[in-house]
Image (spheres, rainbow, N blue to C red):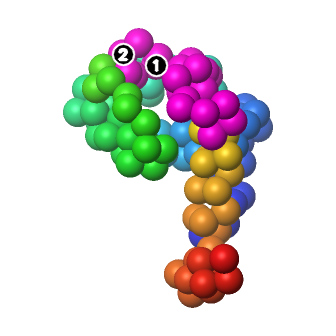
Amino acid sequence: MSEDRYKDQNTQTALQEVLSTLWASSLGIEKVGIEDDFFELGGASVVATQIVSRLRQMFQMDLPAVLLFDTPTIEKLSRYMIEHEAQPGLTEKTATLLKRIEGMTEEEVARSLRSR
């Protein structure tokens, strides 16, 4: 997989790119802009819950189950996550690492971990 799959002209940060890709994958659509409304794109409460669960795992954050009802756009969700991060800059740094790992093969990930 390539980091290019995260690229979208409407996204601005690594976090927004990761969120956009997760939403697009979960909704079965090609692209999601940062101002697109999750529910207007066809998102349902079950999918919203699955996305929040995935975000909890990916970012190791305590996020409320109803988060997408309160922050239904990538822009609002990314702002919420940054405002509630445990350490300033951690969420964006995690997103950057997630993008980097997504672009690697399993062998490259293992080699990178061994070199640390």
Q: Residues within 10 Å of mark 2 (few under 14, many from 20)?
A: some
User: Would residue 34 be visible to someone looking at this image?
Assistant: yes
Q: Cα distance, mark 2 to mark 1?
A: 6 Å
In depth, the one of 94 and 21 nearer the eye is: 94
Q: Which mark is residue 72?
A: 1
In depth, the one of 113 and 49 nearer the eye is: 113
Q: Which mark is residue 69?
A: 2
- Where the N terminus falls, by quadrant? bottom right
**Cβ atoms at labels 2 and 1 below 8 Å apart:** yes
Query: What secondary structure is found at the residue carrying circle 2?
Result: helix
The residue sitting at 37% across, 28% down in the picture is 63
The amino acid sitting under disc 1 is Pro
Quadrant for residue 2, please give it: bottom right
The residue sitting at 64% across, 56% down in the picture is 97
- What segment is highlighted magenta in the picture? 67-90
| Residue 85 colored in magenta in the image | yes
- In the image, taking residue 42 as reference, residue 113 lies left or right, namely right
Magenta stretch: helix, strand or loop mostly = helix
Quadrant for residue 111, please give it: bottom right
The amino acid sitting under disc 2 is Phe
